[in-house]
Each structure stands twice: as structure tokens, then as C-alpha cells.
Amino acid sequence: MDSEPLRSAHPLSESRPVESRPVESRPVESRPGEPLLSVRNLRTHIRSPRGVVRAVDGVSFDIGAGESLGVVGESGSGKSVMARSIMGMATRLTGVSGQVVFKGRDLLTLTRKESRTVWGKEVAMVFQDPGRSLNPVVRVERQLTEGMRQHLGVSRSEARGRALELLKEVGISDPERRLRNYPHEMSGGMRQRVMIAVALACEPDLLIADEPTTALDVTIQRQILDLLRRVQRTRGMTMMLISHDLAVVAGQTDRVGVMYAGRMAELGATAEVFGAPRHRYTEALMKATPTLDHQRHARFTLIGGALPDPTQPPPGCRFAPRCHAVSEECSVDGVLGLARADEAHQAWCLHPVGSPNVASTGGESVVR
């Protein structure tokens, strides 16, 4: 995954807003059976006083129509930045390159006007903090209906009727009264349900949920996750669920991608990745996750070290400094291997879990 220059429309040497891209949207030819969303070599680099932060650095994956993909990893792995890059929410100091092909169009080449026909109507996002995402001085009714009136062209009365149905669908009681509420008059769980309703208002084909349960208690978390999964299945909608909590995506997604330091480490069916991880980072995450049978007062397993400096990432595998199975090859650019458990389960690791040239000794792995 060698680096490549950023798009000329977003050079890091300039402070040009993302929406001022001069590139025209050019539809990419799509064929039956192709994924709804195809991300190829996505890079998001952010200029900072300390240098260029390589927040997302060569990520590729596909999501099929009606499929749910979970994206997990430690805080700081680049998950949310990746989602915002797909949504076109880069800042003035951000450079984005690669391809994000949705329904045959590269979203990174859309003009501001063209973007308005996609965001909200075809691709929507649920943010992790509804208190900051919902407008505090605008009633819920307007926040629910303005997108429908703009994108679907429905009348005020029809939009209000659809808003009532949406609030019922996401499990909000007394929807008539709630339409008249301001966000601060609702609990955190209720605000998150309203945020989901806003995202679903125009019946998007792709829903991106970025840490949708972070600020909620455990009981409400489960309700929100079950709601997202039910709506996704009922509507046949495609969903990307982002979380730092493996348990959140374990029972809610069809496939999962594990991100580390801006790159994809492992990708495959959720049951396979969690049941038989191949990348050493995924294995370490699984061992560090508390379980019900954990012995009382026993020490938890921790991943030693910390994420690398995003402005100066190490060469080769970025997990190498924290890996027990590391070899000299792991720190060489351009030799990162792709280990396949099968065609649909991929791990970018030179010494994957279960590799015949790695022996286990006292809980650690040693390369022979």
C-alpha cells in the first residue's frame, strides 16, 4: 500500500474548501452484481502543526446491496475519518484521494450541487452525539420534514404524516407531542432515535452509523442496535456500523473490517473474523475483550504499546512495534502479505494466526 499523491483538487499545500473541487462528476460504468459501495485506496491526510496526519492511508473494501458491514478498531484508528471522507465531510485542511464509487459514480468527484442530490437522499449518516448533530433551537418536526420536502418534493402535510410514522417506527411514544419538542426536552436515547429517524426520512440506500451508542447506557445501547438492525433488514438497506466495541458489531453485522492506524488489517464474515481471527491485531483485540468467564481479580490481557504517531507511521506493518510475532520483514515497505483463510476472509499480515512458521511460547508468538 504505497502512498500516492493526493488529488490536485485537494493539495495539502493549499487551504481550499472541499466543496470547491473543479472536477466534474463522471459516472463509472456499473454492472449487475457489483457492490453498492466500492472504496478503493482511500486516503485522507490532514494538515496539522505537527505535520501531515495520515488518518486514512490506503483503505479498500466493498459493501453489497442489503448488506451490513461493521468497522472496528481502537480509538484513533481512522474509522470516523473514513466515514466522513465517504460522506464528503472533509475540512479545509484535509486532502482526500482514491475512489468511492456509489451506484456507479465516484463520490469524490461530485460538485457541491451534485452532492446535494446524494447526501440525505441516497446516503445518510447517524452521528455518535445526537446532542451536537440535532439543531438545539429547531423543533423536531422541522428537522424531520425539511429533508423530505427538499429531496422528495412532498407537501408539508404529507411530510408531517411521514414524520409521525418514522417516529413510531423508531419506537418513540406519543409522536404528536414529540414533533413539537426541542432536542433538549428529550433524553439521550430518544434524541438518538430522532437522529435515526432523520437519517431514514428520505429512505436512503446506504446508512452509515458512526458510534451510534457511545453516549448511551447499556440497556438503551441494545435497543438502538436492535432498532438499526431491524430497520436495515426490513427496508433491505445497506448499513455501515462503526464502533470501537467488538461486542456492538458482533451480532449486528454480516461482515466486519478491522482497522488499525489508518489501514484495514482484516476483512471478512463477522462470525469467521471473530471466531478465527487471522491478523495478529485482531487476535490481540479479542484477547483484550472481557468475557463472562473471566476469573475474579485476575488481570485483564492488554495490548502493549500504543498506536503509532499518525504523522510519522512506521514502515511496513503498522502493528509491528506491538506484535509478538514480528520479524524483520514486517518493517519493510511493500512486502505486506495478504493471508486468506478463504476468498472472502482476508488479513494483511506476514505471520497470520495459525501460520506454520510461528510457534507459541508462554502466551507469546515467536517467528522460527
Image: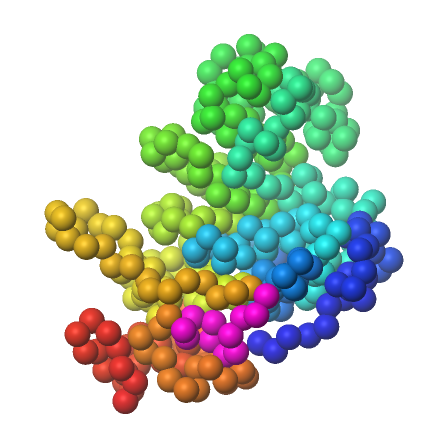
Would you place residue 186 above or below residue 303 in this image?
above
User: How does the figure colour the protein chain or chains?
Assistant: rainbow
Q: Quadrant of residue 341?
A: bottom left
Q: Is residue 169 left or right of residue 327?
A: right
Residue at (52, 44) in percent of width and height: 210
Residue at (77, 42) in percent of width and height: 116
Q: Quadrant of the N terminus?
A: bottom right
Q: Quadrant of residue 49?
A: bottom right
Q: Is residue 300 left or right of residue 297?
A: right
The outermost residue toward the front is 49
Q: Which residues are magenta?
A: 311-321
Q: Is residue 107 something one can see in this rendering?
A: no
Residue at (14, 48) in percent of width and height: 297
Q: Quadrant of the C terminus?
A: bottom left
State yes or no: residue 319 in magenta. Answer: yes
Residue 362, percent from left and from top: 17, 74
Residue at (62, 41) in percent of width and height: 124
State yes or no: residue 153 in magenta. Answer: no
Would you place residue 284 above or below residue 323 in this image?
above
Q: Nearer the viewer, residue 230 or 226?
A: 226
Q: Is residue 69 left or right of residue 123?
A: left
Would you place residue 213 above or below residue 72 in this image?
above
